[in-house]
Image: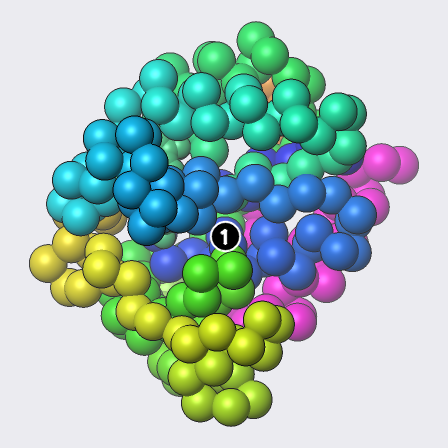
Amino acid sequence: MNLIIFGPPGSGKGTYASRLEPKLNIAKISTGDMLREAVKQQTAIGKKVEKFLAKGRLVPDEIAEALIKEKLGELRGKGFILDGFPRTVEQARFLEKIIKIDAIINLIIPDELLIQKISARRSCSCGEVYNIANVNDTINGMEYRLAPVLPKKEGVCDKCGSSLFQRNDDKPEVIRKRLDVYKKQSQPVIDFFRGRIPFVNIHVNSTPDVVTERILSELTKLNR
Ligand code: ADP
């Protein structure tokens, strides 16, 4: 199964992609993780994209597209879930030309909660994501009960044992810019795909366990 997981920064794309990966036996492909790793290793690409990431801007389409093309080639036909790609209509057109996508999982969450959630995010270089925020809110008649997602030992990743950190772009000044970039450049991707591939619309208003089950059950319905 070839999937895209889409949503604003802080909606939980990385969290759900990580959880769906073993359940669906597909590979999680996160352009954000790949770009951060390139910056950390100071590769040629890493040096080029560093400033974009620090400012909360998107890296040039050609760079993200080249990363994805290479990664998809390595999969040799295994299913995947794309986390963070496509992020512009240009990238969506590119993807449509090179591979067939079975569905897009569209994560829906009110703006008010995003800054709160992103500021409370704690990340691991292996791709795992935790969150110390405890959201208990009713917005437009919908209840949001987003319990914290904590590691067993504070500051240490359950999966790989490395130290957790706060991403440089998870600071308030940069978060605002990322949300702005999302509205202008990424939201149009939703309109591009409407009518072209099946949509799974998911309200992120409960714990990751509950929301993951909801995604799985909606995906099963698509196959009927
Ligand atoms: P989030 O969705 O929480 O903003 P990501 O880890 O997906 O986080 O992305 C972090 C940063 O990496 C983005 O702000 C952007 O600079 C860069 N990036 C990731 N994916 C892409 C992409 N497909 N195109 C352009 N830039 C990207």
Q: Position of residue 181 (x, y in %)?
A: 22, 38
User: Ligand 1 is located in which of the four quadrants?
Assistant: top left
Q: Residue at x 51, y 58 (%)?
A: 127
Q: Quadrant of residue 166?
A: bottom left
Looking at the image, residue 132 sits to the left or right of residue 200; the answer is left
Vertical position of residue 167 compared to residue 17: above or below: below
In what quadrant of the picture does the C terminus appear?
top right
Q: Nearer the viewer, residue 117 or 83?
A: 83
List x then y, in percent, for residue 192. 45, 20
**Residue 216 versus residue 221 in the image, above or below:** below
- Answer above or below: position of 84 versus 214: above
* Residue at the image point whose x is 68% and y is 18% from the top: 100
Work out whether residue 203 or residue 75 is closer to the camera in this orientation and state it: 75
Task: Say which residue label 1 marks.
Answer: 13
Disc 1 Cβ-to-ligand 1 distance below 8 Å: yes
Q: Is residue 147 left or right of residue 78?
A: left
Q: Residue at x 46, y 27 (%)?
A: 67
Q: Residue furthest top?
A: 97
- Which quadrant holds residue 46? top left
Which one is nearer the viewer's eye here, 141 or 180?
A: 180
* Residue 38, image x, y percentages: 36, 41
The secondary structure that most of the magenta stretch takes on is helix
Q: Name the image quarter holding the N terminus.
A: top right
The boundaries of the magenta stretch are: 200-224
Q: Position of residue 125 (x, y in %)?
A: 44, 61
Q: Give neighbour class at mark 1: few <14, some 14-19, many 20+ (Cα, 10 Å).
A: many
Three-letter code for the amino acid on which mark 1 is drawn: Lys
